[in-house]
């Protein structure tokens, strides 16, 4: 139980640090899936560190994410963003949010397609974060599906 409380607390902390003052972001279309990647239940097991991780396809490339139900957005490390071909210039970074240790800098992006186990979402809002060492899969993606946590298992439908 303490592990779950810790995980929720970490999720809330990251969620609070995630920017929520985006200017007039377009409403994302409904989730769609093709017959080739029919959605199914995804079962994730809690890691030894107490977190859930998933390999997720972003714009056709696999990215390792920390699944963070308390985060509002999808955040990419600079390395992951470069690897999947997102165009960004570090000199053009701006403040994209506020974290516990001050301003969070980066660049807002729209991800064409984010897919986990055939559960595809299009036009997912996210950000490339300066200095981040892990990509986070938050509610801009997860909120389009049903997520259930029980004990050391997370199910995404």
Image: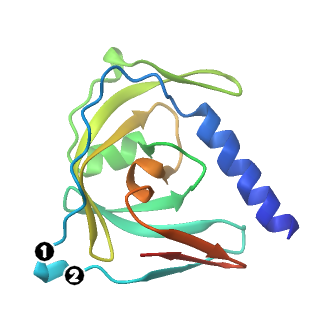
In the depicted structure, whether residue 120 falls above or below residue 94:
below
- Nearer to the camera, 67 or 21: 21
Residue at image x 45%, y 42%? 73
The color scheme shown is: rainbow
Mark 2 near mark 1, Cβ–Cβ under 8 Å?
A: yes
| Distance between the alpha carbons at the discs numbered 2 and 1 | 6 Å
Residue displayed at 59% across by 68% down: 52
How many neighbours does mark 2 have within 10 angstroms: few (below 14), some (14-19), or many (20 or more)? few
Give the answer, above or below, for where 84 lies relative to 64: above
Q: Which residue is mark 2?
A: 38
**Image location of residue 85, percent across then percent down:** 20, 46
> On residue 34, which mark appears?
1
1 or 144: nearer the viewer: 144
Confirm whether residue 69 shows in the render.
yes
For the C terminus, the image quarter is bottom left
Can you see residue 76? no
In x, y percent, where is residue 27?
A: 26, 38
**Quadrant in the rendering for residue 26:** top left
């Amino acid at each position: 139980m303490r592990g779950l409380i810790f995980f929720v607390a970490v999720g809330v902390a990251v969620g609070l640090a995630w920017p929520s003052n985006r200017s007039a972001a377009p409403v994302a279309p409904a989730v769609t899936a093709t017959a080739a990647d029919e959605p199914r239940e995804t079962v994730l097991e809690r890691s030894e560190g107490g977190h859930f991780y998933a390999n997720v396809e972003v714009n056709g490339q696999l990215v390792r994410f920390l699944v963070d139900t308390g985060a509002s957005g999808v955040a990419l490390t600079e390395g992951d963003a470069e690897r999947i071909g997102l165009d960004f210039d570090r000199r053009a970074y701006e403040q994209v949010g506020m974290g516990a240790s001050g301003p969070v800098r980066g660049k807002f992006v729209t991800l064409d397609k984010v897919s986990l186990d055939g559960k595809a979402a299009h036009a997912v809002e996210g950000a490339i974060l300066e200095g981040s060492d892990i990509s986070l899969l938050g509610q801009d993606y997860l909120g389009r599906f049903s997520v259930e946590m029980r004990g050391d298992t997370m199910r995404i439908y």
